[in-house]
Image (cartoon, rainbow, N blue to C red):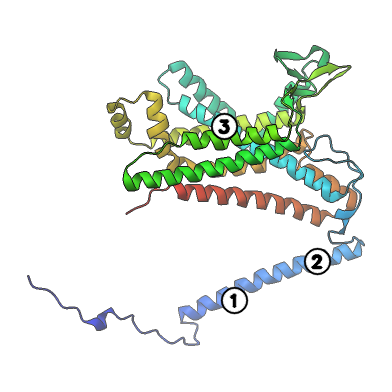
Amino acid sequence: MSQTSIDPRSLRAPPKRPIKLSWSDERVRGIFWQVVVVGIVVSMVWWLWSNTVHNLEVRRIATGFGFLGREAGLPIAESLIDYNPTNSYLRALMVGLLNTLKVAVVGIILATVFGTLIGIARLSKNWVLRTLSATYVEVIRDLPLLLQLLFWYAILQGLPGPRQALHPAEGVFLSNRGLKLPWIQWEGAHSLALVAFLLGLVATIMYRRQALAKQIADGVPRAVWPVALVCLVALPLAAWAALGAPFTPDIPALRGFNFQGGLTLSPEYFALLAGLVMYTAGFIAEIVRAGIQAVPNGQREAAQALGLRPGAVLRLVVLPQALRVIVPPMTSQYLNITKNSSLAVAIGYQDIVSIANTTLNQTGQAIEGIAIIMLVYLTISLSISGFMNWYNARIALVER
């Protein structure tokens, strides 16, 4: 077979043309317009900055974040950390940040579970279940989120008082004061037991990876459940018992005109959480449905030929492959939950936006207050995006 020789000189890059200081040279025109655009942007930023500084000086408005150390005098109905109106504005904003995270984290978890179930129900062979789930998705996505929040808040405000509260289960009460649930009296021992559980979870994951790697190397399977039982159950229980944490649950009970004890979900928080979860679940359901339908039918048929039940086929074969399609658009929905939580101000829930607005109204530090809100949401959004991008890279197919 004849082989054609290639001249090495033909593989060299063509020589670069020298730049001529002429308008006919496209490189000169490109550099010129880039300099013009950068100059316009810098000029606009400088004009906005100087105009803002001048207006603040004329109105004798102080700038800076020194106000964060002053006494807030701001009442906050619910907080995850100790707070009273004599604390500083910085602590009040920390309370608002934690309230925002409480809504975002719980909302993401519940919306993911609920939306996944709805998405699977949309593909059910049962006509009633399929129709109800499709109706839910179409109706819930066509209604504005703010309207849904006001709807849930109005329903909670229309519930009877504590003495006539709905009592669906033992220790569970629903009234216009919110939802009361049994809880535990959280102490330091509970925190250490939780830390022990998280450390045990990390140890279990690391051991499982090592066991799989050794199994691939020598073909000998290794049981993971004994290590998981010790790390996830025995270790936290030992820490719990050694530190003397109480095992008695704190069950709410009616005392006078209100309930005492237990866990309280205020009407504002409950309405905000319900509205965000149900609204976002409608979009997540469509994402899950599309991801499941993207898996070729041959995968299902092969799993069924191996004798797997329909539930096992969905859990072990279909959903793991559908995740590669589901995860990227799911990131947008998680970001939407976080950003849509700012609508809490419409129903009186004191998140970071509500507290920052009150702070800037009291102090006049509008620019600083808006900057704090932007920084908080930017940080949370980038954190969610970074985690989801990392997880998406973990489950992506690797070409060999």
| Residue 144 in sight here | no
Sequence-first tag of 1 and 3: 1
Sequence-first tag of 2 and 3: 2
On screen, residue 386 above or below 109: below
Q: Amino acid at mark 3?
A: Ala
The x and y percentages for residue 179 are: 74, 23
The x and y percentages for residue 3 are: 12, 73
Near mark 2 (Cα within 10 A), the count class, few <14, some 14-19 or many ≥20, is few
The x and y percentages for residue 129 are: 48, 19
Residue 305 position by quadrant: top left
Horizontal side, residue 346 vs residue 61: left or right: left
The residue that disc 3 covers is 281
The residue that disc 2 covers is 51
Near mark 3 (Cα within 10 A), the count class, few <14, some 14-19 or many ≥20, is many
Between marks 1 and 3 in the image, the one whose residue lies nearer the viewer: 3
Q: How many marks?
A: 3
Q: Which mark is residue 35?
A: 1
Q: Amino acid at mark 2?
A: Asn
Between marks 2 and 3 in the image, the one whose residue lies nearer the viewer: 3
Residue 241 position by quadrant: top right
On screen, residue 233 above or below 65: above
Q: Amino acid at mark 1?
A: Val
Q: Quadrant of the N terminus?
A: bottom left
Q: Quadrant of the C terminus?
A: bottom left
Horizontal side, residue 324 vs residue 380: left or right: left
